[in-house]
Image: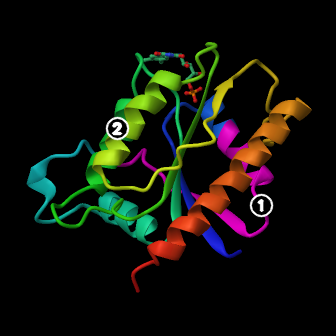
């Protein structure tokens, strides 16, 4: 694969529909793109007290981001914003000051919800955070997935062909975006 993408699942739920969505995206991504999960569940709550010496899960997080060309956020909406666990992971990765892991790292956002707004409000909030973190963010296409039971099988297969095609196109566009960003902002050695 030419591009390595690290994805965050914003949910810690064992039955997460966003994890299913991430599975589906992994299957539908162009062949040149490899997806790997960047886990967030073992991170303690961030405090500046840790800045002098990050604990192992936080070091692993920063290394995982350094190891990929781009980041994909696959997240639920919690109370019209992003889940605290995801915000905590972003806060960790953005620190210590001067070592923000998201700077110049291209990113995309997508999410699924049983509600028809499909995480739109959470994504808007996440876009603001990523903007501050200086991550070049794909503006279009947007993807607000209205999840109905059975839409994605436990193996990550999308049962509805129109949705599968939409998600395939999302990943194709994301690859094109990452390619464009890396042309002007090559990865630091
Ligand atoms: C939700 N849910 C929800 N859905 C939504 O569309 N907008 C929202 O603001 C919220 N708020 C919210 C808060 C909290 C604390 C929970 C637990 C849930 C419902 C949510 O979309 C649903 O539980 C999804 O299944 C969560 O995604 P995962 O964990 O299945 O990936």
Which quadrant would the N terminus be assigned to in this image?
A: bottom right
Q: Is residue 134 left or right of residue 148?
A: left
Please tell me whether mark 1 sits on a helix, a strand or a loop.
Answer: loop
Q: Is there a contact, CB below 8 Å, between mark 2 and mark 1?
A: no
Residue drawn at x 59%, y 59% as measured from the top left: 177
Above or below 68: residue 46: above
Pointer 1 residue = 30
Q: Nearer the viewer, residue 89 or 186?
A: 186
| Image mark for residue 128 | 2
Residue drawn at x 68%, y 65% as measured from the top left: 34
Residue 111 lies in the magenta-colored region:
no
Above or below 98: residue 148: above
Image location of residue 156, percent across then percent down? 78, 42
Residue drawn at x 31%, y 56% as measured from the top left: 93
Question: Quick check: can you spot residue 157?
Answer: no
Magenta residues span 21-43
Q: Is residue 63 left or right of residue 162?
A: left
* Colour scheme in use: rainbow
User: Residue 65 appears in which quarter of the rendering?
Assistant: bottom left
State how far apart marks 2 and 1 are (Cα): 28 Å
The mark tally for this picture is: 2
Instruction: Decide: few, some or many residues near mark 2? Use Cα within 10 Å; few <14, some 14-19, many ≥20.
Output: few
């Amino acid at each position: 694969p030419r591009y390595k993408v690290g994805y965050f699942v914003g949910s810690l739920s064992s039955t997460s529909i966003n994890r299913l969505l991430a599975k589906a995206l992994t299957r539908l991504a162009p062949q040149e793109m490899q997806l790997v999960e960047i886990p967030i569940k073992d991170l303690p709550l961030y405090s500046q007290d840790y800045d002098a010496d990050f604990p192992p899960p936080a070091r692993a997080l920063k290394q995982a981001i350094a190891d990929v060309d781009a980041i994909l956020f696959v997240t639920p909406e919690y109370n019209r914003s992003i889940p605290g666990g995801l915000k905590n992971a972003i806060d960790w990765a953005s620190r210590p000051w001067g070592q923000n892991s998201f700077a110049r790292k291209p990113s995309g956002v997508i999410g699924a919800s049983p509600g028809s707004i499909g995480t739109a409000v959470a994504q808007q909030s996440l876009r603001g955070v990523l903007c501050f973190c200086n991550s070049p963010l794909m503006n279009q296409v947007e993807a607000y997935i209205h999840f109905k039971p059975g839409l994605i099988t436990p193996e990550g297969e999308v049962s509805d062909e129109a949705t599968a095609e939409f998600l395939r196109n999302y990943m194709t566009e994301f690859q094109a975006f990452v390619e464009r960003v890396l042309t002007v902002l090559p990865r630091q050695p």
